[in-house]
Amino acid sequence: MSDPAHMSIEDILDNFSLMEEWDDRYRYIIELGRALPPLPETARTDANKVQGCASQVWLATRVSEGGADGPTLTFEGDSDAHIVRGLIAILFVLYSGKSAAAILKVDAFVIFDRLGLREHLTPQRSNGLRSMVERIRSDAQAALAAVH
C-alpha cells in the first residue's frame, strides 16, 4: 500500500478502476485511512472538529507563506470511523500542500463522482464529506483574504 501523501488522485482513480467489487474498494479506502499520520491529541479540539459529520472528525489546517501562488495549506485529520479516515486521506491527496487558489479550483465532488463514491455512501457520510470539503474551502478562502 502506497503512502497517500505520495499518491496523486490519478493513482487512486487507477487503483479504483482495477477493483470491480465495492467491498474491495471500501477496503482500499480504509487502507488509505490507515496510512494517514496520527493526529496529535493537541489537535483534537472543538475548533478543529468538523460539524455536520455523523462520526467524530477533526481537521487541522496549517497555512504557510506561499510563493507567487499565495498561501499554501497543509492539513492533518482523523476520524473515529475507518471509512471516513479513508475519505479524509483522499481529500488530503486532492488538497493538502496546495495553494489556497489551487484548492478553490478543485471540485472534490467531481472526483468523488468519478470514483463512484457518492452513490455508495450513506446520506450521512455524503453530508459529512460535504462538510469536510466546505471546511477546507473555507480555510482556503480565509487564507487568501488574510493576504489581501
Image (spheres, grey):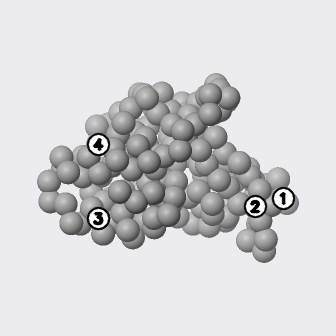
Please give the name of the residue rendered at 67% of the width and 55% of the height, measured from the top-left corner.
Answer: 73
Q: Position of residue 26 (x, y in %)?
A: 26, 46
Residue labelled with disc 1: 147
The Cα atoms of the two marked residues, 4 and 2, are separated by 33 Å
> Residue 71 — which label?
2
- The crowding category of the residue bearing disc 4, from other C-alpha atoms within 10 Å (few below 14, some 14 to 19, many at least 20), is few
Residue labelled with disc 4: 121
Amino acid type at circle 4 is: Leu
Amino acid type at circle 3 is: Asn
Q: Position of residue 25 (x, y in %)?
A: 24, 52
Quarter in which the N terminus is drawn: bottom left
Q: Earlier in the sequence, mark 4 or mark 2?
A: 2
Q: Nearer the viewer, mark 3 or mark 1?
A: 3
Q: Secondary structure at mark 2?
A: loop
Please give the name of the residue rendered at 33% of the width and 44% of the height, measured from the top-left corner.
Answer: 30
Contact check, label 3 and label 1, Cβ < 8 Å: no
